[in-house]
Image (tube, rainbow, N blue to C red):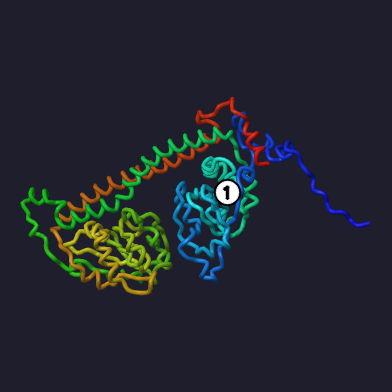
Amino acid sequence: MARGKKVEQVLTLEEKLEQALVPEDEQPYSIPENWCWTIVDKVSTVVTGGTPSKKNPEYYGDDFPFFKPSDLDAGRHVFKASEYLSRLGMNVARVIPKESTAVCCIGTIGKCGYLEIEGTTNQQINSAIPNFNSLFLYYFLNTNIFLNQLWSKSSATTISIVNKTKMESCYFPLAPLAEQQRIVDRIERLFSKLDEAKEKVQAVVDGFELRKSAILHKAFTGELTNQWRQVHNIGLDSWEYVELGNICKVNPKKIDTTDLSDDLEVSFFPMSALSEIYGEITESQTRQLKEVRTGYTNFSEGDVVFAKITPCMENGKSAVIGKLVNDIGFGTTEFYVLRCGPKLYNFYLYHLLRDKHFRDEAKAVMTGAVGQQRVPKSFLEKYILHLPSVPEQKEIAQRLDEMFAREIKISGIAESVLTQIDYIKKSILSRAFRGELGTNDPAEESAEELLKTVL
């Protein structure tokens, strides 16, 4: 007798509903009674992206957006792609409709973007095509509860991965349809106010370099100390043009350590020790002399060190060396050491080296292979300074120290406000998906009835 085909069990709607609901003892937290816990698979269709073969250049063009994880940085408003496909490429790709939420599930797990236009994605992205309110889905996928679920389901490989099936199985708090819209409206109103504040605060942070450049320009053209010169009855004609090499030694001769013990402890500064913000030494180390005698640059207290390689030079890495262990310091050979003579104040030189105008001039003459370019020593030695007297140099340096200290404090406060705004957004989302924004109507039909429409 022939073996019969396996008969698939036909479930009733109530049985399907029971399978779609999260058991009470597994629910992450309590939600309003007319909500229900289900899974992402029931509120959306999850699609994994793919990359059309690069061997066929005809697949690529300017017609159809091909979104990648970096494009999701646009968050709520994703409409620009870093790459585009041709119509032919679109036909072999998995098209994702607009108003879907794209979620990075490889590497930067959990980064989300709301697609405002139709497009496709690469294989690092799983897209959730909504069954109900698209923004209610998007905002939940931005919550910590969803992100934590993704990470808990990620594969422990070299690069963290969450596949389509695991994303589909994440728990989702489903609200009645009208409630979904009220929640979205409330979130967007609150976020709009926060984004307006964030834009203003971000402008303070972004303007730091511009303000710094303007201050330094005034310092090195004499404008910053106009009043000081008037008080001291000194004119701008007291400034003189000099070559840096005539008033400063560039990479002076190393000290003789022949008679010193190999075990003598000395200061050591790797390149990472120099802050890009304000010349602070952040990672000074102590080493034995035998470890650094050869192959390293030597410097003394009061020397100015200047990173000569890219991108450290362009980022302004430099510092004035302070107190050293046993008065001896060593560091990477990628530092230039500048030892000021009596006509040049070291803190004045330090500020000059951090001036963007100076660094742009240095960058223009860098030599070497791309990524390993260096500022020639001759550039520093031949560099022409319009130099004030030492007392005015000290006045300028003091004012710059004070002004930049204020600027850094303001920028630090602004950065903390930006962090706080992001925290407030996460808090709003957390409350929204617990039914705590004051939008819930207990009289509305249960979300279970809504869920039945897709089962």
Query: Is 234 positioned to the left or the right of 11 in the image?
Result: left
Farthest left residue in view? 233
Farthest right residue in view? 1
Q: At 47% from the left edge and 35% from the top edge, which residue is drawn?
A: 185
Instruction: Pick whichever, 233 or 81, lies toward us.
Output: 81
Rendered image quadrant of residue 239: bottom left
Instruction: Pick whichever, 100 or 383, lies toward us.
Output: 100
Where residue 156 appears, as percent x and y from the top left, is 62, 55
Q: At 59% from the left edge and 60% from the top edge, which residue is drawn?
A: 158
Q: What residue type is labelled 1?
A: Ala
Image position of 424 with respect to 316: above or below: above
Look at mark 1 in the image and give the residue it sits on: 128
Where residue 170 appears, as percent x and y from the top left, is 62, 45
Instruction: Pick whichever, 423 or 399, lies toward us.
Output: 423
Query: Is 435 positioned to the left or the right of 20 in the image?
Result: left
Query: Is 108 positioned to the left or the right of 312 in the image?
Result: right
Tell me the quadrant of the picture where the C terminus can be found.
Answer: top right
Image position of 353 with respect to 426: above or below: below
Q: At 63% from the left edge and 36% from the top edge, which residue is drawn?
A: 450
Where residue 213 appears, as percent x and y from the top left, is 25, 55
Tell me the quadrant of the picture where the N terminus can be found.
Answer: bottom right
Question: How many marks do you count on the picture?
Answer: 1
- State the SS at label 1: strand
Q: How dense is the environment of label 1, judged by Cα within 10 Å: few (below 14), some, or many (20 and up)? A: many
Is residue 365 visible in the rendered image? The answer is yes
Q: At 55% from the left edge and 71% from the top edge, which residue is drawn?
A: 55
Where residue 31 appears, as percent x and y from the top left, is 59, 32
Farthest top residue in view? 443
Instruction: Pick whichever, 112 or 245, lies toward us.
Output: 112
Is residue 268 visible in the rendered image? The answer is no
Image position of 439 with respect to 53: above or below: above
